[in-house]
Image: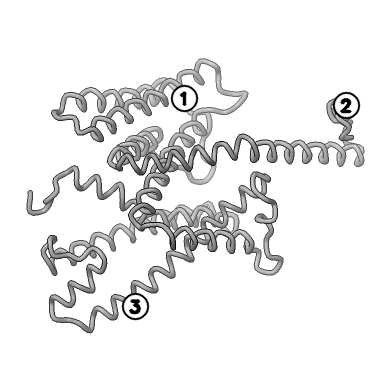
Amino acid sequence: MRDFMPFGVRGIFSASAVLFFAYIGFDAVSTMAEETKNPARDIPIGLVGAMTLTTALYCVLAVTLCLMQPYASIDKDAPFSVAFSARGMDWAKYIVAFGALKGMTTVLLVSAVGQARYLTHIARTHMMPPWLAQVHPRTGTPVNATVVMLVATAIIAFFTDLGILSNLLSISTLFIFMLVAVALLVRRYYVAGETTVANRNKLAACIIAILATSSATATCWGVNVNGWVPYAVTVPAWFASTVCLWAFVPQARAPKLWGVPLVPWLPSASIAINVFLLGSIDYKSFMRFGFWTAGLLVYYLFVGLHASYDTAKALAADSAMAKVEDGDGKPARGAVHNGEY
């Protein structure tokens, strides 16, 4: 098997963690739900179809490249162009270069579409300047957010090394996907005012156990622990935590149209895989990620949180005022005392 895995299993997982950013474009499909005519049908088709097609193309390209050249001779900056030149097909490298240029343009556009929608939704809560949430009256697209995102992305990409960007982007993506899987479990198993305290506590305990066992497995892998004994403890513990969630905590919410299947197994596996891949990334990337996360957390606590709370409070006061003017209700006592009525 060494001919197929020259760097071993550890090399495969290390590369998978770093190159995970190659797949993040598919999440742009979900950000377009607001502008989709039939999101319940089209979003799942787009997500599954994009992932399936992308994975198949990547596998075919990787196999083709390895058949054209030995892995040690593959050029990391221009793999296919150099491979075609080595096979005496110099004309093909120009086609590859043109395709790569068009591919980068497509990636930039897709990234701009997805990230601009994120920025728009954040600005709607006033955690960022509301100017970014403005939508063009004719096209219905967030022009301001798109322009700001493109300019900021171009500046960062121009002055930052590609290796640093890819590692930071991969660790951010894996961390976010892990949080999404946790959020899915919470959404399926917890409904405020309906879920009992006992079930809520069991849900919290199971999620904490899943995260802890996944982190333990990733830590053993990251510090290169020899032997299989640690994994023989952490992996069955993760499985037992998922079984407990499946057996002892009833689901509180069922999707109306389409939902993630195999809950809690699929979200739990997503948590374990994402955390495991995080353990394959170097510590310097974690330091950069921690620095940016701490900075954004400070901004959120001291600026964004207060702005969004004030906005929600003002909207509630306006809603109460509208009901009073329509004769549908009375102003809230707090609104009168706070001078908002």
Q: Is residue 118 left or right of residue 49?
A: right
Callout 1 amino acid: Pro
Q: Position of residue 54 (x, y in %)?
A: 33, 60
Q: Which residue is mark 3?
A: 98
Q: Which residue is mark 2?
A: 337
Q: How is the image coloured?
A: one colour
Q: Which mark is residue 90?
A: none
Callout 3 amino acid: Phe
Q: Position of residue 207 (x, y in %)?
A: 42, 26
For discs 3 and 1, the disc positioned in front in the rendered view: 3
Q: The residue tagged with tag 2: helix, strand or loop? A: helix
Above or below residue 112? Residue 9 is above
Extreme residue in the front direction: 159
Q: Which residue is mark 1?
A: 250
Query: Which mark is first along the chain, 3 or 2?
Result: 3
Q: Position of residue 323 (x, y in %)?
A: 86, 38
